[in-house]
Amino acid sequence: MSGKEEKTVQATFTYAVRYRVYATCRTPLRTGGADGDTELVLTNSKGRPMIQGSSLAGAMRAWVQQTHGTAMAEALFGSQKRAGHLIVSDGTFNKDFEQSVRPRLKIDPKTGSAAEGQKFDLAQINAGASFHFTLTWLGQGDNTAERGALEETLAALNEGEIYLGGQKSNGFGRVVLAVKKQTYDMKQEQGRTAWLQMEASELEDMAAPQASKTPPELTLPKERKQPRVTFTLTGTADSILVKSSAVEYGKEGHSCTPNLAEREHPLPPKSADGTQEQENRGTPILPGSSVKGAVRAQAERIAQRTGREALVEELFGRGSIETDNGKAGRLRFEDAKLEEAQPQKITRIRINRFTGGVIRAGLFKEEPLKSKVTLTITAPADCKEGCALLLYALRDLGLGLYNLGSGGAIGRGYLNVKTLTAESVDRTVTLTFSEGGGYTVSDPDGLAAEWMKAWKEAAK
C-alpha cells in the first residue's frame, strides 16, 4: 500500500438532456450588436445572421423567474455565486433567410412631431426565416422539476408568451418551434457512447431536420402562465400611407413614395434560366411601431388630463437617454397586414414656404392605400388601470380623433372602425361604432366595468 491517499473524484454530471430547437419567425426579428448600428443585423464569421445565446438565455430566464421564482431561474441559468445547469448555444439562421430595412422616426413628445435628427433605418430578418439552437441540461441525476420548467419555457416561446431579440413591444421576435429531445444517462455505457457520438448525429440532423426521425419531436405543453388581454380593432381606411424608405422613379422621372411593404420567406421559385423572377414589393403593412406611436400620443394626452403620466411609461416604456438604459413597455403591438389593399397613385406638388409658389421640379407622387385594417394589441391582464387607458385611447381612434401613418393633415390614416373587442381568458367587452360617430358598449362579463373601477380608484 502506498503512502498516498486515494481521492474520489465526482463526475461533473451524470445525466444530460439535449434539446435541439428549430425556430421559424412568425414576425420579423431584430438582432443587433452593441455598437448601436440599426442598419445592420448581427452576423457570425460566415456572414450569416445569428442571435446570441446570451440573448436567448436572457429572454427565457426572465420568464422562468416570473413564473417559477428566483430559485429555479438560478438553478437553470446560474447566478454570480454559481453556474447554472443549462448551456444555451447561439442561434444560427439557415442560408435561405431574407433581410430588409424599415424606416423609423422618433417623435418628440412635447411637439408631437418628428424629433430633430431622429430619422433612421432599422434592419431586420423577415418573417418566415428559420434558425436553430441547442439547450443542454447537465446535472447529477435526473431532475424532473428543472426539466419540466425548461420544457414549459419552450412551450411559452412556441405559444408567443416569450418574444426574442429587439423591438419586442413592436411585435418583433414571435417564433414557433419544433423541438427534438435526447437524454443521456452517463452511468450507463449506452448513454456515454451516445453522448460521445452526439456531435456527428446533431450536425446531420441540423442540416436536414425534416428528414431526420431520431430523436422524435417533443410535444410541448400548452399551459399558459401569464394571462393577457387581446385588443382587436377592425375597420377600413380610405387612404392610408406608411412611407417606404425606398423612393421609386417612374418613366417620366417623377418620384413616387409607395406604402411600406414586406415579403415573407420563402422566396418564390427561380425561373428556368436560373434567375429570380421579378417580384412585387410584397404585402403592404402598417408597422406595429407606427400604431404604437400614434396610440401612445393619444394615451399621453389622456394621462396628462388625469395626472397619470407614470402609467404611460409603464405601458409603453421609454427609450435610453445618456446613462438611463430605458425601460421596456408592457404592451405589444403587432404589424397589421393590409391584405387586398387597393393602391391609389396621387400626384402632389411641393410648395415654397417663403413665396407660396410651386417649387421647380417639385412634382411627386404618393401611393396611399384603400384597405381593410385589423389591429392587434396585447396587454397584461393584471394591469387593470392600464387596460382602461388603452381602451380609452383605442376608442378615440374609432371616433376619428387621430390618424395612423403619414398625412394626417390632409385627411390620411383616419379609420372607419367597425368594432373594438377586448378578450381576457373567457371574458369579452365589445365597442361597436356607428357611421354617425357614436358607439355602443357590450360588457356582459363586467370586464370593462372592472377596469373603469380600477381607473377611478387610482385617481383618488
Image: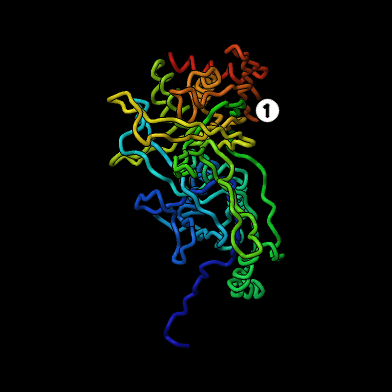
- Which sits in the foreground, 328 or 382? 328
Judged left or right of residue 254, residue 93 is: right
Determine which quarter of the picture holds residue 206: bottom right
Quadrant containing the C terminus in the rendered view: top left
Residue 74 vertical position relative to residue 457 in the rendered view, above or below: below
Query: In the image, residue 228 lies at what x, y percent?
Result: 58, 33
Residue 160 vertical position relative to residue 277 in the rendered view, above or below: above
Query: In the image, residue 105 lies at what x, y percent?
Result: 40, 37
Q: Secondary structure at mark 1?
A: loop
- Which sits in the foreground, 17 or 341? 341
The residue that mark 1 highlights is 426
Which residue lies at the image location 44% right of the left edge and 54% below the top edge?
Answer: 41
Query: In the image, residue 453 lies at what x, y percent?
Result: 53, 15
Residue 333 vertical position relative to residue 311 in the rendered view, above or below: below
Which residue lies at the image location 28% right of the left edge and 41% below the top edge?
Answer: 322
- Which sits in the foreground, 249 or 6? 249
